[in-house]
């Protein structure tokens, strides 16, 4: 590759105008090097170039380098309460089934038949005593082993054709999976969230409501939008009735209301402080004024609490884990949000509302009160993401600077993303 070519491609990149396919053609062989150069040319504290939000090649790279290597939030254990209960999801190009086996363990498998690769299970959730591929009826046990394959020769060894397993971890009632052969270290996040989630008792919850929202924006655009409340004042009137914007406080630990709130959780013997690592952050913060829940009027949406919050400690545990989830535990309900990439400019955002398993709809809660704020907020965010995507797709887009205070969460996410992509390219080189 000539220096001039590199300069030209870097200049195109910096101006957000790069056509990656063209750039790759210009410099082949050496695609990895060009992408590394593009990452290296990133201006710290600024948005990514437009190609990172639109280009099919970079999208494929994101799937391979991020979603097929990192721990991905799959769902809640209460969604698969009994042996044979399952949920399915698709991570990039890979359908996965998550189930509870006969021994009660949570397991996950690639949802791909070992015969000719058919997608075995098409339902989003359900219950089954065995996994039967509908194509030629190869039948798998809940531990993934092949139980039955008719019309195969005498020397056929079923033991060699178990479903391909996917790594699984359970964290305080939530399930994470990793498609990589060797998953990254999950222990720091797992340890932190086991402590943070302990009072919320998500194992004793049920899903009261679930909604899928397709956002026509790149997955990073969705994550970025979730990482700042800079837009909350103008974009989220309903949410901001009760939601405390942490960035109102330069140092949360120096805020008396936050200190008082944390002290209540400390006194109850629970984790109260912020937990943070390169790919996650969990913070427990009070709500505004006399609000007791994140609802339109600040009153609890559910009569039965979900978990064990100390008396008069009304707030939310909000946490993010890159690249797939951001969540809120409030004293009466929890909202889990999972985002999965569908295409370069399409992301599936699934929101699940968890309430105590004993709570009865129509008696202890009504769905409209429970879901209103988040349904409105999610719709607002979808509109923001999609309009942002349109602007970034433009040949006139130039990556701008993030606010170091109000958009610190985005800066952290983009740094992590660039690091992970860089590591992948380094390994692939
Ligand atoms: S592809 Fe599954 S049984 Fe043939
Ligand atoms: Fe938002």
Image (cartoon, rainbow, N blue to C red):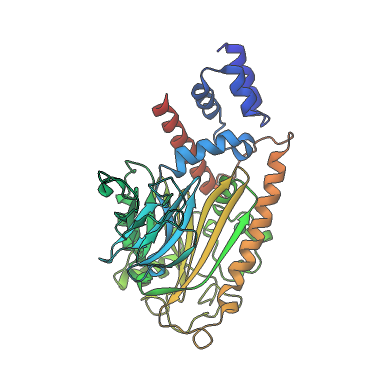
Q: Nearer the viewer, residue 53 or 99?
A: 99
Residue 299, percent from left and from top: 54, 80
Name the residue located 45 percent from the left edge and 31 percent from the top edge.
422
Q: Nearer the viewer, residue 36 or 91?
A: 91
Q: Is residue 107 left or right of residue 395?
A: left
Residue 294, percent from left and from top: 54, 72
Q: Is residue 138 left or right of residue 392?
A: left
Q: Is residue 151 left or right of residue 401?
A: left
Tell me where residue 44 sits by quadrant: top right
Residue 33, percent from left and from top: 50, 22
Outermost residue to the bottom: 363
Can residue 259 be seen in this snapshot? yes
Name the residue located 71 percent from the left edge and 50 percent from the top edge.
387
Q: Above or below — where is 306 with respect to 222?
A: below
Q: Nearer the viewer, residue 171 or 227?
A: 171
Q: Above or below — where is 422 with respect to 84?
A: above
Name the residue located 34 percent from the left edge and 47 percent from the top edge.
164
Q: Nearer the viewer, residue 108 or 169?
A: 108
Quarter of the picture containing the C terminus is top left
Can residue 47 be seen in this snapshot? no
Name the residue located 41 percent from the left edge and 32 percent from the top edge.
423
Tell me where residue 240 sits by quadrant: bottom right
Q: Above or below — where is 387 with respect to 33?
A: below
């Amino acid at each position: 590759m000539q220096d001039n070519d590199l300069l030209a491609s870097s200049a195109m990149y910096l101006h957000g105008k790069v056509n990656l396919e063209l750039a790759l053609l210009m410099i082949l062989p050496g695609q990895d090097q060009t992408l590394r150069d593009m990452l290296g040319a990133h201006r710290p504290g600024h948005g990514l170039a437009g190609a990172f939000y639109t280009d099919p090649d970079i999208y494929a790279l994101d799937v391979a380098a991020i979603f097929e290597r990192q721990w991905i939030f799959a769902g809640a254990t209460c969604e698969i309460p009994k042996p044979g209960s399952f949920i399915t999801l698709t991570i990039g190009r890979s359908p996965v089934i998550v189930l509870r086996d006969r021994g009660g363990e949570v397991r996950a498998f690639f949802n791909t038949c070992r015969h000719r690769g058919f997608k075995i299970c098409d339902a989003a959730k359900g219950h089954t005593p065995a996994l039967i591929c509908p194509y030629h009826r190869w039948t798998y046990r809940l531990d993934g082993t092949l139980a039955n394959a008719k019309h195969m020769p005498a020397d056929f060894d079923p033991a060699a054709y178990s479903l391909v397993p996917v790594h699984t971890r359970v964290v305080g009632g939530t399930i994470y999976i990793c498609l990589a052969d060797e998953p990254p270290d999950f222990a720091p996040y797992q340890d932190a969230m086991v402590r943070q989630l302990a009072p919320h008792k998500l194992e004793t919850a049920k899903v009261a409501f679930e909604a899928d929202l397709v956002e026509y924006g790149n997955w990073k655009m969705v994550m970025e939008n979730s990482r700042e409340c800079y837009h909350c004042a103008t974009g989220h009137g309903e949410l901001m009735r009760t939601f405390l914007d942490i960035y109102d406080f330069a140092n949360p630990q120096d805020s008396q209301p936050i200190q008082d709130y944390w002290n209540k959780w400390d006194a109850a013997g629970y984790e109260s402080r912020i937990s943070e690592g390169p790919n996650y952050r969990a913070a427990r913060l009070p709500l505004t004024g006399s609000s007791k829940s994140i609802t339109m009027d600040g009153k609890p949406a559910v009569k039965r609490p979900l978990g064990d919050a100390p008396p008069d400690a009304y707030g939310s545990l909000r946490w993010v884990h890159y690249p797939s989830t951001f969540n809120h535990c409030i004293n009466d309900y929890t909202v889990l949000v999972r985002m999965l990439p569908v295409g370069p400019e399409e992301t599936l955002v699934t929101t699940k509302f968890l309430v105590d398993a004993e709570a009865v709809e129509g008696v202890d809660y009504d769905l409209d009160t429970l879901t209103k704020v988040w349904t409105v907020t999610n719709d607002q965010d979808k509109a923001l993401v999609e309009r942002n995507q349109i602007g970034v797709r433009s040949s006139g887009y130039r990556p701008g600077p993030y606010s170091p205070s109000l958009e610190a969460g985005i800066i952290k996410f983009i740094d992590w993303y660039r690091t992970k992509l860089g590591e992948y390219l380094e390994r692939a080189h």
